[in-house]
């Protein structure tokens, strides 16, 4: 049984852009629009999670000994 690869942030964002265009076009039926909208919500949550993870990783730096330390963004 093959496992489904999770979308990258860029892939999810591209699909989300396509969803917005489809909804703005007004050509989908009500049921199709609801399904598309629901998928958009799922993609939005995925993107938010990926952004939060990236922010957390960037908020840390690795010191000379290989230990993670909080990033000092204010230069204190």
Image (cartoon, grey):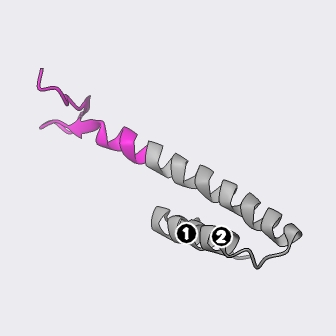
Distance in Å between CA atoms under marks 1 and 2: 11 Å
Left or right: 8 in relation to 38: left
On the image, the x and y values in percent for residue 63 come to 16, 36
On the image, the x and y values in percent for residue 66 come to 20, 39
Q: Splitting the image into 4 quarters, where does residue 41 fall?
A: bottom right
On the image, the x and y values in percent for residue 17 come to 55, 69
Residue sitting at x 55%, y 65%: 12
Q: Is residue 61 above or below residue 16?
A: above
Q: Is the residue marked by circle 1 packed among few (<14), some (14-19), or many (20+) residues within 10 Å?
A: few
Mark closer to the observer (1, 2)? 2
Q: Which of the pair 22/12 is nearer the observer? A: 22
Left or right: 18 in relation to 26: left
On the image, the x and y values in percent for residue 16 come to 58, 66
Q: Which of the pair 39/23 is nearer the observer? A: 23
Q: Inspect this view and state whether residue 5 appears.
A: no
Q: Residue furthest bottom?
A: 27
Q: Which residues are magenta?
A: 53-76
Left or right: 26 in relation to 64: right
Q: Say which mark, if any, is on residue 46.
A: none
Q: Specify whether residue 3 is painted magenta.
A: no
Residue sitting at x 61%, y 67%: 20
Please name the residue that numbered disc 2 is placed on. Answer: 24
Q: Splitting the image into 4 quarters, where does residue 64 fall?
A: top left
Mark 1 or mark 2, earlier in chain: 1
Residue sitting at x 30%, y 36%: 59
Please name the residue that numbered disc 1 is placed on. Answer: 17
Residue sitting at x 53%, y 47%: 49
Q: Is residue 50 above or below residue 31?
A: above
């Amino acid at each position: 049984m093959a496992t489904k690869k999770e979308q990258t942030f860029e892939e999810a964002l591209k699909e989300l852009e396509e969803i917005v265009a489809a909804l703005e076009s007004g050509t989908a039926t009500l049921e199709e629009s609801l399904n598309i909208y629901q998928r958009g919500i799922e993609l939005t949550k995925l993107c938010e999670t990926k952004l939060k993870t990236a922010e957390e990783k960037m908020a840390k730096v690795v010191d000379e000994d290989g230990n993670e330390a909080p990033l000092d963004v204010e230069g204190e």
